[in-house]
Structure formats: structure tokens, C-alpha cells
Image (cartoon, helix red, strand yellow):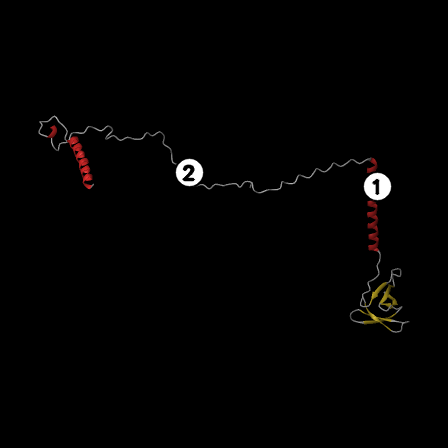
Amino acid sequence: MNESRTKLLLTILGVLLLFVAWHYLGPSDGDGSAVGGREFGATSPVGRIPGAGRQTKPPVEEILDLKVADLEPHPHEYKVGRDPWRFVNPPPPPPPAPPQPRRLTPEELRAQREAEELLRQRQAEAARKAAEEAARPKPPVFALKYLGRFGPADRPIAVFTDGKDILNVQQGEVIQGKFLLSQVGLESVEIRFVDFPKEPAQRLPIGG
């Protein structure tokens, strides 16, 4: 098996050598001293290869300026639109327009004027009474504190204090020339005003 392979390789090598020899040692016009009419070692001139030695340039159709600024990355601004997966309640409808006021009849206009006039009269009367009340003399303020009572039931004595002194006043006596001790009860007394006999009595409890 190896011998057959070796023979085959040798045959192929021989054929290649014969092809090379024929290519370089082919017939020539010389004196026949060389094998096949060509001197051994001589080479035949090779013709000029078409296009050899000529530099070809690609055709230039247009020259463009390179804009370096356009090559730099620019940030993009994206606007977020409506999310299709999010449901939004529609806005409420606008409120209805207010109805136009109805024109009043002559009777209604007269009643409205009378009501306005009555309101003005009442306001004026209230202001007059307030002014009279403010100008009317008022009784003085009883500033003593009632502490309690002692003595017989038919002639009780009330005890008062002004924060410093103690005053023992019998029922029916005048206190400080302004107040009258009209009644002494078990838990309170009644004070009247000397200069204002028509004023209602002021009830004063113990400790008050």
C-alpha cells in the first residue's frame, strides 16, 4: 500500500517537472546549442503587462466638508406621553350657567321697597336705644365680698371684706353711702342702690 502511494506521488512530481521544463526551455530561433532550441538558463523577455506601472485613481465625484460637531453625541429629550395602561377619570363637566334673574312685577318691587324701609327703621330704632342705654347713668359696682352672717334671726348681721378690712353690716344699713343691705339670707344677701331706687336688687352669694 505504501509503495503504490509512493509511485503515485513520484509520477505526479515527474509530470510537474516536465511542465516546468517545457515552460522555461521551449523551442527558440537560436543555433540549436540549447535543449529545444533555447539556451539553458536564458529567460525569454516578458511582454508588458497591461496596466503595469500606471497608477489608477478612483474617480472623485464630490468633496464634502467633514463637520466634526455633527459627530459629537447630542442628548435627546423625550417627552413622556399618556400611559395607555393607566386609566384616568374624565374631568367633571362644567357647572351649568346660573339662570337669568326674573324681572319683578310692580307689586313685587313695591313689597321689596317696603321691606327695605322697614329694615332701615328697625336698625335706626336699635341704634337709638343703644345710644340711650349708653348715656343713661348706671349704678355703681358693688366690689365687697360677702363672707357670711351671724346674730339673731330677726336682726342678722352680714360680714363683708374689701380684701383688707372686715365690715359688719346689719340688715337695713347703708354701706359706703351707696349701697343698701336690704335683706340678709342664709346663703346670700340682697344689695340695692341708694341713688337708683328703681334698679332691681343685686343678689350676692357667700364668697361672691
Q: In the rendered structure, are the residues bearing label 2 and label 1 in contact, judged by CB atoms less than 8 Å apart?
A: no
Q: In which quarter of the image is the N terminus?
A: top left
* Residue 121 locus on image (x, y percent): 84, 46
Answer with the quarter of the image where residue 148 lies.
Answer: bottom right
Answer with the quarter of the image where residue 141 lies.
Answer: bottom right
- Residue located farthest toward the top when viewing the structure as drawn: 29
Question: Residue 176 vs residue 95: left or right?
Answer: right
* Residue 73 locus on image (x, y percent): 43, 41
Is residue 38 in view? no
Q: Say which residue appears at 83% left-offset and 42% top-offset.
A: 115
Mark carried by residue 114 = 1
What is the three-letter code of the residue carrying label 1?
Glu
As helix, strand or loop, the secondary structure at mark 1 comes to helix
Q: Judge the density around disc 1: few (<14), some (14-19), many (≥20) Cα neighbours within 10 Å.
A: few
Q: Say which residue appears at 42% left-offset and 38% top-offset.
A: 70
Q: Name the residue under label 2.
A: 70
* Residue 154 locus on image (x, y percent): 91, 71
Q: Say which residue appears at 20% left-offset and 41% top-offset.
A: 2
Q: Quadrant of the C terminus?
A: bottom right
Q: Which of marks 2 and 1 is in front?
A: 2
Question: Residue 17 vs residue 194: left or right?
Answer: left
Question: Residue 71 vs residue 27: left or right?
Answer: right
What is the three-letter code of the residue carrying label 2?
Asp
- Residue located farthest toward the right when viewing the structure as drawn: 154
Mark carried by residue 86 = none
Q: Judge the density around disc 2: few (<14), some (14-19), many (≥20) Cα neighbours within 10 Å.
A: few
Q: Distance between the residues labelled 2 and 1?
A: 85 Å
* Residue 134 locus on image (x, y percent): 82, 55
Question: Residue 151 vs residue 51: left or right?
Answer: right
Q: Is residue 69 above or below residue 126?
A: above
